[in-house]
Image (tube, grey):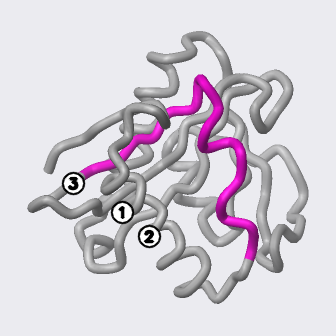
């Protein structure tokens, strides 16, 4: 497995397609959640796209956002997704570790804030995040805000 972290303009058309397909396959189809998956945050000058390829196939992805893209005083990690066939390998833990490492490398000494699906609270807590909000609905799915200082 090989990891990549690239800005939007550095992504090939084929890789961009694979990243967007994985996101849509999981968030829109698997989770049955029609929502505006494509937003302008993907193309921000300082946004980074972290992904892993295994045997030539994209198997994990997270979007790393600079300060103020989602939260006024924090960076953010979002669109965290692992291909269904890779979940039994616990790749999600490796993905979030990689995402934290890259985010802190890109924007050192700035906290990371995320909007996490509530059922993943324990997962994110195990990676140093603390819950900082009451549950709220986003696109019909219960979420919580979490912070890693």
The location of residue 69, given as percent across then percent down, is 75, 32
Task: Kindly tell me whether residue 148 is visible in this rendering.
Answer: no
Q: Which tag, 2 or 3, sits closer to the chain's start?
A: 2
Marks 2 and 3, how far apart in space?
Answer: 14 Å
SS type, badge 3? strand
The location of residue 49, given as percent across then percent down, is 45, 40
SS type, badge 2? helix
Judge the density around disc 2: few (<14), some (14-19), many (≥20) Cα neighbours within 10 Å: some
The location of residue 14, given as percent across then percent down, is 31, 56
Residue 38 magenta-drawn? yes
**Residue at the disc numbered 2:** 21
Mark 1 or 3: the one toward you: 1
SS type, badge 1? helix
Instruction: Choose top left, top right, bottom left or bottom right for residue 17.
Output: bottom left
Quadrant in which the C terminus is drawn: top right
Marks 1 and 3, how far apart in space?
Answer: 10 Å
Residue 67 lies left or right of residue 125; in this view the side is right
Q: Residue furthest top?
A: 109
Disc marking residue 18: 1
State the extent of the magenta-drawn residues as a range: 35-52
Of residue 23 and residue 111, the one placed in the foreground of this image is 23
Q: Residue at x 35, y 71 (%)?
A: 83
Q: Residue furthest front?
A: 13
**Residue at the disc numbered 3:** 53
Q: Which tag, 1 or 3, sits closer to the chain's start?
A: 1
Disc marking residue 140: none
The location of residue 74, given as percent across then percent down, is 74, 26
* Residue contact at pointers 1 and 2, CB within 8 angstroms: yes
Instruction: Choose top left, top right, bottom left or bottom right for residue 44.
Output: top right
Above/below status of 30 relative to 109: below
Residue 17 magenta-drawn? no
């Amino acid at each position: 497995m090989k990891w990549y972290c690239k800005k939007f303009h550095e992504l090939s058309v084929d890789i961009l397609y694979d990243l967007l397909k994985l996101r849509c396959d999981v968030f829109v189809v698997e989770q049955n959640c029609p929502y505006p998956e494509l937003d302008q945050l993907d193309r921000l000058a300082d946004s980074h796209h972290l992904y892993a390829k295994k045997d030539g196939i994209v198997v994990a992805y997270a979007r790393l956002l600079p300060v103020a893209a989602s939260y006024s005083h924090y960076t953010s990690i979002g669109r965290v997704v692992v291909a269904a066939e890779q979940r039994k390998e616990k790749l999600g833990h490796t993905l979030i570790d990689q995402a934290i490492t890259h985010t802190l490398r890109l924007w050192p000494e700035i906290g990371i804030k995320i909007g996490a699906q509530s059922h993943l609270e324990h997962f994110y807590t195990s990676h140093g995040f603390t819950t900082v909000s009451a549950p709220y609905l986003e696109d019909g799915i219960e979420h919580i805000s979490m912070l890693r200082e």
